[in-house]
Image (cartoon, rainbow, N blue to C red):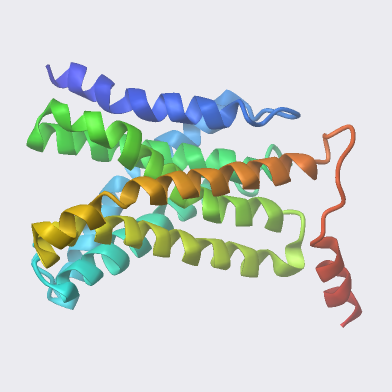
Amino acid sequence: MVVLIFLLALLPGILWLWYVYKSDRFEPEPLGNVIIVFIGGFFAVFPAILIELGLRMLLGLTGYATTIYEAIGSAWFIAGAVEEVIKFSVVLFVIYFNKEFDEPVDGIVYASAAAVGFASLENFFYMLRFGAHVIVLRGPLSTLGHIVFSTLWGYGLGRGKFHPRIAKKLALYGLLLAALAHGAYNFLLMSPSVFGENIGIPLAFCVIPLTLFLWYVMHKHIKKSEAISPYNPHPEEDELDKYDDMNETA
């Protein structure tokens, strides 16, 4: 039964990751590299748990989102900030400096791999605690949520690889957006406990349009990254080149 639950926890993420992976049309990443980043994201759950426990103690959070303070602290400072930084670190230290990271879209592919690894183990723990049925919602929503959050900084990493003078700015900007989006998602889900069912339940359902909007943003980022790929036979001009030229002149 535990093995079956584990396989069910993996399945949604693998399907989502395969979808993103196939979006890399011109120079697909070696599957071995994608799997390594996936494994890195998978085991990154453990340091994330330790850091989150420490921050909860530091901020005086009980883990029960019954107040605005508890919800904001848990959503943005615990889940949003910590989990996105952890996944970001996996991609940065495991694959970013690898020679195979040679297209802007690679940032999105590897960010998705780290996110799916993280979400898969998280799903497994939730299923053990609350029952296998939770994958019905966590598979299409929470797993996809992890992907679309992380691709915000993955896009920044991918673009920054080819614009080293502004690479840090792009990565940090993407990381901030990911943490904010992740926090907003979690806060909406906590709304029924904070605001009551009449207000909280409609707010909780807002995670669906939020996730769909971020899915749209991810697709725009993939399309732009592929358009300026050095392996694209007819690449578009990268508008960030002018910022590099300005920085070099300065």
Choose top left, top right, bottom left or bottom right for residue 84: bottom left
In-image side of 142 versus 154 (left or right): left
Can see residue 63? no
Q: In the rendering, at what x and y percent does residue 96 appear?
A: 61, 48
Choose top left, top right, bottom left or bottom right for residue 132: top left
Q: In the rendering, at what x and y percent does residue 158 appear?
A: 66, 50
Residue in the foreground of this view, choosing between 164 and 202: 202
In-image side of 240 versus 171 (left or right): right
The mark tally for this picture is 0
Residue located at (27% from left, 27% from top): 9
Can see residue 194? yes
Residue located at (12% from left, 16% from top): 1
In-image side of 86 versus 186 (left or right): right
**Does residue 99 lie above or below 30 as drawn?**
below
Residue located at (46% from left, 59% from top): 178
Residue located at (63% from left, 30% from top): 23
Residue in the foreground of this view, choosing between 223 and 59: 223
| Quadrant of the drawing holding the C terminus | bottom right
Q: In the rendering, at what x and y percent does residue 64 appear?
A: 8, 62
Q: In the rendering, at what x and y percent does residue 72 appear?
A: 24, 70
Q: Which residue in the rendered view is the most extreme toward the front?
A: 198
In-image side of 101 versus 210 (left or right): right
Choose top left, top right, bottom left or bottom right for residue 102: top right
